[in-house]
Amino acid sequence: MMKTRIFLIFLFISLSHFLLAESTGTHIRIKYKSYKNDIVILGFYSGKNMYVKDTFEVNAKGEVAIDYEEELPGGLYFVAIPNVGFFDLVIAEHEISLQTSQPDFIASMKVLKSEENILLYNYQAYMRTQYNNKMTIQERIKHIPDKEDSIKILKEQLIQLDDEILAFKNNLFEAGKDFFATKIIRATEEPRPRSREEGEEEKDYNEYLYAFYQNHYLDNIDFSDERLLKTPVFEPRIDKFINVFSMRQPDSVSASCQRVIDRSLQNEEVFKFTLTKLFNKYAKFKYMGDETVVYQLAMKYYIPKTAKWVDSAQYAKIYDRVAKMQYNLMGMKGKELIMKDSAGNYHSLHSLNSLYTILVFWDETCGTCRKSMKEIKDFYDKTPRDSVDVYAVNIGRDLPAWKAYIVENNLNFINVVDPKDFNNFRINYDIFSYPVIYILDKDKKIIARKIPAASMEDLINVMEGKASSMKPMESEEKGGL
């Protein structure tokens, strides 16, 4: 029965070739059975959003004529009756003709001309039928909890239905592989990992799943077809890949972004959309570590001028920003600082022997700085000296005021100043605002960058194993490029 249904669907698709005439532009005819003398809206998808393109009149016979002399860009569009509902429409052909009615536009849809939409609506009708069949069986299972034999039979029917659906889709993807509608449907398909094997450790299976989704989650998306940008499936798939199937460490996020972007290089418009989306997402610097993602994406795609659409002004802005980040990313060893304290004695940052060093750049005239310094002092005073050191760099110009503030507030850690910036600290640590707080490990590698003082203790507790985890840390860095 299923094979007969599949054959008839594709026979219908093939016969519809005879309905097509030579044409230019885009011409759509819609006949409503119970809607007339009003308007409909033609809209389009772009990423996750829906936009109105035009409105058209419905005549007294319920007919709508949508005509464009220029061909509309291919994609998934929608036709809406205000305050009633809408249906989707694949636009990838010059001529489309269909009829439908309220209240269920999809169930009553009859496509008169359009191979693409015949395929789409036959697929939707089939999936709706199978979904209803599954719901019926599942309801029956709920109401016979004590009859194991009957439940077994019903569960076998569910498995059979899933097999039929999978076979239907596989036939569709093969027989209809040249249709844009098929690409839309296929892009919604989740890849199917293997089941956990008998005796397989959970840790090993989770590692397999991570590698599987990293390598195969994007397989069903045709990155060479820019029409997918005008559907509601492309952008959410990218978001899910980055947000769900990628580890939260900056290098892992960056690697996942590059997997997506590298695939998008097949098409200039898809590449532009994908790179711009992901770069701008992390250029907001919402969380600590986002700067690593921005730096690596810039160095791979923007700085070599692979992104050919970027003008000279934007290129210069990106170049300037990544130049300021190149010495102070997480995981790098912080540059050495040798500065004088208020008594004229020199102190080396790299000579400090504590497990962690709080490196702070501040100005005593700044209210936020004073609040942060109080939090730093409170934390410093309650921790062992071999655990945490503080190297506080004054970036202000009023040295007498700085010295007085140190004494008055008993800032009993290393307080230094370099008024002429002999250490080049503004470049080496990206200091163009204040306060700025880094945390370095015992080897002076950067483990936290531009964080709020309130997060220091939680972070070090995680590093010390005194806490299992913490939510992604918001960055103090101002975003935007």
Image (tube, helix red, strand yellow):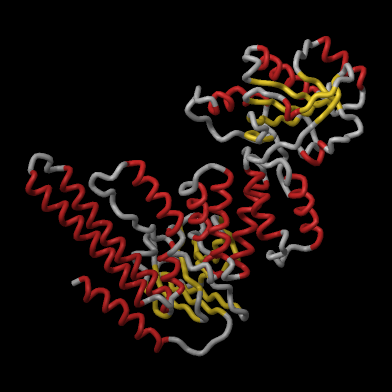
- Describe residue 368's horizontal placement relative to residue 28 as left or right: right
Residue closest to the eye, 327 or 126: 327
Q: Is residue 323 above or below residue 402?
A: below
| Residue situated in front as seen by the camera: 124 or 413 | 413
Q: Position of residue 121 (x, y in %)?
A: 37, 69
The answer to whether residue 57 is visible is no
Q: Position of residue 9 (x, y in %)?
A: 30, 76
- Horizontally, residue 104 falls left or right of residue 66, namely left
Q: How many marks?
A: 0
Picture residue at 27% right of the left edge, 63% below the top: 165
Give whichever of 163, 107 is nearer the camera: 163
State the image coordinates of residue 400 (x, y, percent, origin top left): 92, 17
Asked if 62 appears above or below 130 in the picture, the reply is: below
Q: Is residue 452 visible?
A: yes
Name the quadrant containing residue 395.
top right
The residue depicted at 58 percent of the width and 25 percent of the height is 460
Question: Residue 200, image x and y in percent?
Answer: 28, 45
Residue nearest the observer in this picture, 61 or 197: 197
Q: Residue at x 80, y 62 (%)?
A: 312
| The N terminus, quarter of image | bottom left
**Above/below status of 118 relative to 478:** below
Whether residue 229 is situated above or below residue 398 in the rendered picture: below
- Residue sitting at x 36%, y 41%: 203
Question: Looking at the rendering, which quadrant does residue 423 occupy?
Answer: top right
Residue 406 falls left or right of residue 148: right
Q: Quadrant of residue 472?
A: top right
